[in-house]
Amino acid sequence: MDTDQNPKAKEKKTVGPSSTSAYRDPHYWDERFSSEEHYEWLKDYSHFRHLIQAHVKPGSSVLELGCGNSRLSEELYKDGITEITCTDLSAVAVEKMRENFSYKGYKEIKVLEADMLDLPFSSECFDVVIEKGTMDVLFVDSGDPWNPRPETVTKVMAMLEGVHRVLKPDGIFISISFGQPHFRRPFFNAPKFTWSFEWITFGDGFHYFFYISRKGRRSLNCEESCEKHEQPSSINLLHEELESEDYIFRMNIDM
């Protein structure tokens, strides 16, 4: 039962796996979601709501990748964005999310079990695709961040190709991540993509990145487009800011 339904219910403290490789294991997520009611990666909606509202309008068809037990889609729905499809690789997460939305009367939101590397949707069918911390899973154990392992590159490109395909000609891809722009740029700016590449930061102490890619808007001067928003000169990993983000501490991040 969702804690919003029962105020007295206590959510169990999230405990990360013994190794980062578990984040790529569907069984880990099934087990975790079976007992965990809610967890937000990379801050909750209130921290970037102003950015969402600037780019996503009511009436937009939205696809959320890797919904897990996040309340992102629920918050979008409350803001009038009701044409939402959520996907997750975990059957447990999907079933619990369906039960939650049904209980709360959010009948318009669809929840499907799907792999983000092989999206089961027709081409050009969504106005917006959003992922929050989901793509970061693909970078677990990726090796040198300047030169990721070939298997990492293959998976990230498969995800981005799928997102690009399902977006409408003028669609927007929003990626919320702690991955820095100089590590993400080579993927987003692959020649096969027609989208632009911009970012905005949010958060206190530790800066998270809100990437915005507009399909069909790629600049002829890519470097100028990529640097539209100023990158922080430094990023401080504050323990008090990140102590609940066990995922981040278990990632191999080269600062």
Image (cartoon, helix red, strand yellow):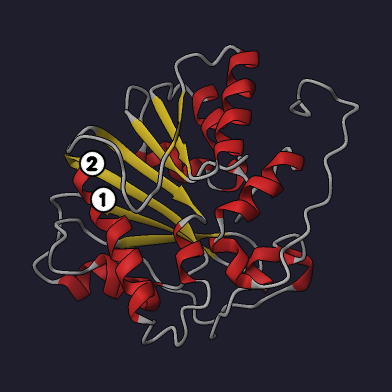
Residue 185 placement (x, y as % from top left): 31, 72
Residue bearing mark 1: 162
Residue bearing mark 2: 166
The mark found on residue 35 in the picture is none
Q: Measuring 28% from the left and 54% from the top, which residue is drawn there?
A: 213
Residue 228 placement (x, y as % from top left): 29, 66
Q: Secondary structure at mark 2?
A: helix
Residue 171 placement (x, y as % from top left): 23, 41
Give the image quarter of residue 68. Answer: top right
Specify the farthest residue to the left: 220
Q: Measuring 41% from the left and 54% from the top, which residue is drawn there?
A: 175
Horizontal placement of 249 versus 221: left or right?
right
Residue 69 visible in image: yes
Residue density around tag 2, few if under 14, some if 14–19, many if 20 or more, within 10 Å:
many
The quadrant in which the C terminus is found is bottom right
**Residue type indicated by callout 2:** Val
| Picture layout, residue 243 above or below residue 5 | below
Is there a contact, CB below 8 Å, between mark 2 and mark 1? yes
* Count of labels in the image: 2
Give the image quarter of residue 8. Answer: top right
| Picture layout, residue 9 above or below residue 99 | below
**Residue type indicated by callout 1:** Gly
Q: Secondary structure at mark 1?
A: helix
| Residue sitting nearer the eye, 8 or 211 | 8
| Picture layout, residue 67 above or below residue 15 | above
Residue 214 visible in image: no
Horizontal placement of 96 versus 133: left or right?
right
| Residue sitting nearer the eye, 218 or 16 | 16
